Amino acid sequence: MTKQAAKFVEPAKSQMGFVAVPGVGDKAVWEPAKQTMHVLYNNHILNVLVKTADPEAVKRQRAVTLSKAILEQMAE
């Protein structure tokens, strides 16, 4: 979590079809119905779609990997 977000952001919670994903950006959730990872990072929202025929857990892990790679580039 960025220093700026630490004051304003509570950890994500799994609810209403969203699954909280700790350790990605300031806050992140996986939306299984849309195969999409939604990430809040330093007042920006990143949406990563993973449209593959893989099992749900693999899709989510791929979204985490892609999100972290993009956030790393944004932080530089």
Image (cartoon, rainbow, N blue to C red):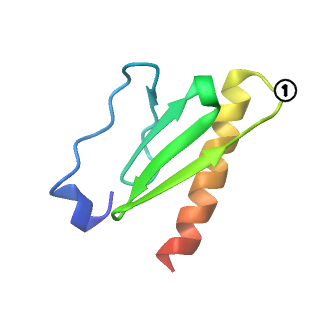
Residue 71 falls left or right of residue 56: left
- x and y, in percent, of residue 39 in the image: 46, 49
Please tell me which residue is depicted at 45% across the width and 26% down the height of the picture: 18
Please tell me which residue is depicted at 33% across the width and 36% down the height of the picture: 12
- x and y, in percent, of residue 59 in the image: 71, 33
Give the residue furthest to the bottom.
76
Residue 72 falls left or right of residue 41: right
How many marks the image carries: the answer is 1
Identify the amino acid type marked 1.
Ala
Q: Residue 31, located in which quarter of the rendered image?
A: top right
Q: Residue 13, located in which quarter of the rendered image?
A: top left
Q: Which is more toward the observer, 15 or 76?
A: 15
Residue 50 falls left or right of residue 41: right
Query: Can you say whether 27 is above or below 56 in the image?
Result: below
Please tell me which residue is depicted at 59% across the width and 53% down the height of the picture: 67
Classify 10 Å Cα crowding around label 1: few (below 14), some (14-19), many (20 and above). Answer: few
- x and y, in percent, of residue 69 in the image: 63, 61
Which quarter shows the N terminus? bottom left
Query: Can you say whether 42 is above or below 1 in the image?
Result: below
Please tell me which residue is depicted at 17% across the width and 54% down the height of the picture: 8
Q: Name the residue tied to disc 1.
A: 53
Query: Can you say whether 44 is above or below 16 in the image?
Result: below
Give the residue furthest to the left.
7
Give the residue furthest to the front.
34
Element assignment for label 1: loop
